[in-house]
């Protein structure tokens, strides 16, 4: 999902946070990538956030369902159900009405 950027040259931290996925996926235009990287050079907090996201993506890409403890599986299921309930998913079911296994 590409975020429409403001016309000014400099990005603010909030914009950088919103663009991290597009940046990591190589989906930014050349101009926006330069603006993104220029902000990173001046902002240690956003640079640290980008590195945390890289580590998170690398780590989660290695997980399989068998890697999760029963407690972690139950917690993820609980979080998913509360999210779908809050989003109007109805009764904890997903978009198609199914309920993830507990």
Image (cartoon, helix red, strand yellow):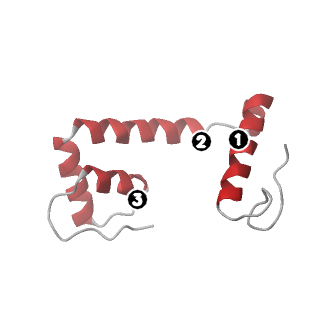
Helix, strand or loop for disc 3: helix
Helix, strand or loop for disc 1: helix
Residue occupying image coordinates x 20% and y 49%: 39
Helix, strand or loop for disc 2: loop
- Left or right: residue 79 compared with residue 71: left
Q: Nearer the viewer, residue 24 or 99?
A: 99
On-image quarter of the C terminus = top right
On-image quarter of the N terminus = bottom left
Label 2, on which residue? 61
Q: Tell me if mark 2 has few (under 14), some (14-19) or many (20+) residues whose alpha carbon lies within 10 angstroms of its own.
A: few
- Left or right: residue 49 compared with residue 35: right
Q: Are marks 3 and 1 in contact (CB under 8 Å)?
A: no
Label 3, on which residue? 22
Q: Position of residue 56 (x, y in %)?
A: 50, 38
Q: Position of residue 28 (x, y in %)?
A: 34, 63
| Mark pair 3, 1: CA separation | 25 Å
- Picture disc at residue 76: 1
- Whether residue 38 is visible to the viewer of this picture, yes or no, is yes
Q: Position of residue 21 (x, y in %)?
A: 43, 54
Q: Position of residue 80 (x, y in %)?
A: 70, 49
| Mark pair 3, 2: CA separation | 17 Å
């Amino acid at each position: 999902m590409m975020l429409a950027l403001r016309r000014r040259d400099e990005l603010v931290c909030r914009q950088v946070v919103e663009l991290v996925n597009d940046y990591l996926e190589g989906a930014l235009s050349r101009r926006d990538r330069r603006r993104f990287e220029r902000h990173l050079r001046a902002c240690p907090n956003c640079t640290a956030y980008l590195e945390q996201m890289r580590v998170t993506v690398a780590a989660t890409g290695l997980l399989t369902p068998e890697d999760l403890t029963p407690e972690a599986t139950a917690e993820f299921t609980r979080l998913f159900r509360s999210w779908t309930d809050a989003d109007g998913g109805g009764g904890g079911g997903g978009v198609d009405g199914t309920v993830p296994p507990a």
